[in-house]
Image: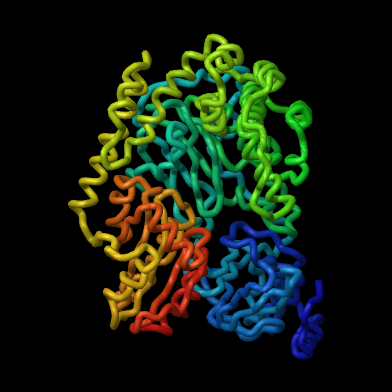
Amino acid sequence: MKKLFSAVALLIVLSACGQSGHRVVERPEFAARNTSTLEIDKVTVNDTATIVHVDAFYRPNNWIRIASDTYLRANGEKYMITGADGIELDAEHYMPDSGEDSFVLYFPPLPKGVKSFDFIESDCDDCFKIYGIDLTGNYTPRQSLPRDVRSVPATTELPAPELKIGKTTVKVHIHGEVDGYDPGEVTFIVFNYLNYEETEAREVSAENGVYTYEADQYGTTWGIVRLGNDLTYMILAPGETAEVHYDITAANAGSGRYSNLTRGQYVGFKGTYAAVNTEMNMPGNEFDINMYHLAMDPTVYLMDDAQYLQTVRRVHDEKVGELGEKEISDALRTLYGYEISIQDFAELVNKEMFFQNSEYVATRERPTGNYSDYLTDADVEYLKTVYPGKGAMLAKNFASLLRPLCNPVFSDDQLDYICGEDADLWREFRSSLPAINQYESKEGASPEELEALDGVSDPFFRATYDHMRAQAIKARDEALAAGGFVIVDVPAVPAEDMLEAIIAEHKGKPVFVDFWATWCGPCLNAMKTIKPLKGEMADHGVVTIYISNTSSPETKWLAMLPDIGGIHYYMQREDWSALCQKYGIEGIPQYMIFDKEGNKTFQTAGFPGVENMKNELEKVW
């Protein structure tokens, strides 16, 4: 990579070579950071300057920026930036086609003997920050996890999954904190495989580095700790109290492109599944299952049923061989084995979809082939050999088994043959899920769906529907009582004219429009990111309009509105489709800005960042 130096910089370096305070540290280690965009290639410290050589890695032809109030922090003091080579401060710096670039930043000299410093690219929340940049050359992260979660004995057997409802408590302990470092929002998410939803748990308390969450749990399932951009997965028993211990400095060790460190244990657990949770989160013990690998293979759609089954077998054998090379406990090996078997079921039951997707990958045109949507006798024989049993409810991808088992593609005879005595359990899931999946709709499950639900023998399923339904109604009622938002009926105009009619109601004011859905993670993350800008938007009279549709369950949609605020429209799918076709909306989140005369001045798919959005809004307010 080309390094950029000015004549001035070269003179500074040469003049400092004979001074006692001169130090050059190549590719220093660091304690923590909030970005992988910047890597410190070299730091030169002398009596006249501190020179930081930076390598940048970012999307080609997208820009980064270094603020003019960037500073280094050492021994509690700030050392403000004095100049730069290869990048203009405060300007948008566009990355080349390679996605890699280099520049040099200049600061006043650091105190002699200082062992580390922080790089702070301004004090904004999303500015680049790297903490504890080491100048000694012998940095080793200190292990901060408690001893009793570092050495959980491996187990040979997995505790059996349970079908019951429970109020689960999870305590997340943060260790190894770095002065000034904010790891970002800490959240805990519980996955519900019955409706394929991830639900953010309620934060009960957050003090002294311990975050406590509570969540309703329906059967043994998975939880996710989200700390900044890092995700930590764990199995949870319903109704238990579990603990997660997370070491920030250990988690950051070895995360830099230039780091010579090896990431050690950075997380430990307490609870029913502590042993397997700790083991599977140990570096090197990860096991990747790509459920849709064959769907992205451009040759798959050219295969017949026999060739496709042969390919599924080959992928299975490759994953089993990969698993056999891992030095892990029998319990973790069993868990990963479940995931391999679930992959087989997903690939065979969904093969029509896989064929169609493969054709699109190969041709980039709408699939035209009529592909097999049934299981051959050979498919059924194979699935019987890989059927994982009820223990598969412990697998992270269990929902990808549950959906096929509940799919009408299986006849009752095939289900009995493949699953044996477990077939009755899957039939109960099959009878219950249609009702359970209507728990958030305005009317709830239909009489026919409730009749099927009441026909199952395990009371867990009816109790689950009743509990989820009651919680949804409570959340809706609380949202309506809280207020802070406005719901407006969709205008009674042709679908293709709806947006113009909505905007016309606010003529004389700038309008910001957000197309979103309750199930759209990027939509919800963007709403959190833009919150600091909302006050300024209101000060300038900007009308904020949010448009969603019936793919978002109405009860859940209502429950989220108090946090969002603004004006809301809830469209039928056909109206939404017409609007999307007219405006070329192919995905969400999608944003539009209209000026005071109702003219559209901006449209983008995906959140462009707070600064970009503000720049566009400033043109109309």
Color scheme of the displayed model: rainbow
Of residues 188 and 242, which is closer to you in this image? Answer: 188
Q: Position of residue 34 (x, y in %)?
A: 56, 61
Rendered residue at 59%/60% (across/down): 33
Of residues 243 and 536, which is closer to you in this image? Answer: 536
Specify the quadrant of the image occupied by residue 513.
Answer: bottom left
The answer to whether residue 339 shows anywhere in this view is no
The answer to whether residue 517 shows anywhere in this view is yes
* Residue 35 in the figure: left or right of residue 14: left
Q: Is residue 462 above or below residue 588?
A: above
* Residue 389 in the figure: left or right of residue 478: right
> How many numbered markers are drawn?
0
Rendered residue at 36%/37% (across/down): 215
Of residues 40 and 572, which is closer to you in this image? Answer: 572
* Residue 342 in the figure: left or right of residue 544: right
Q: Position of residue 578 (x, y in %)?
A: 43, 60
Q: Position of residue 346 (x, y in %)?
A: 62, 32
Rendered residue at 44%/20% (across/down): 162
Q: Is residue 523 above or below residue 235?
A: below
Of residues 539 and 144, which is closer to you in this image? Answer: 539
Q: Position of residue 203 (x, y in %)?
A: 35, 45
Q: Residue furthest top?
A: 421
Specify the quadrant of the image occupied by residue 113.
Answer: bottom right
Rendered residue at 43%/19% (across/down): 428
Specify the quadrant of the image occupied by residue 342.
Answer: top right
Q: Quadrant of the N terminus?
A: bottom right
Q: Quadrant of the C terminus?
A: bottom left
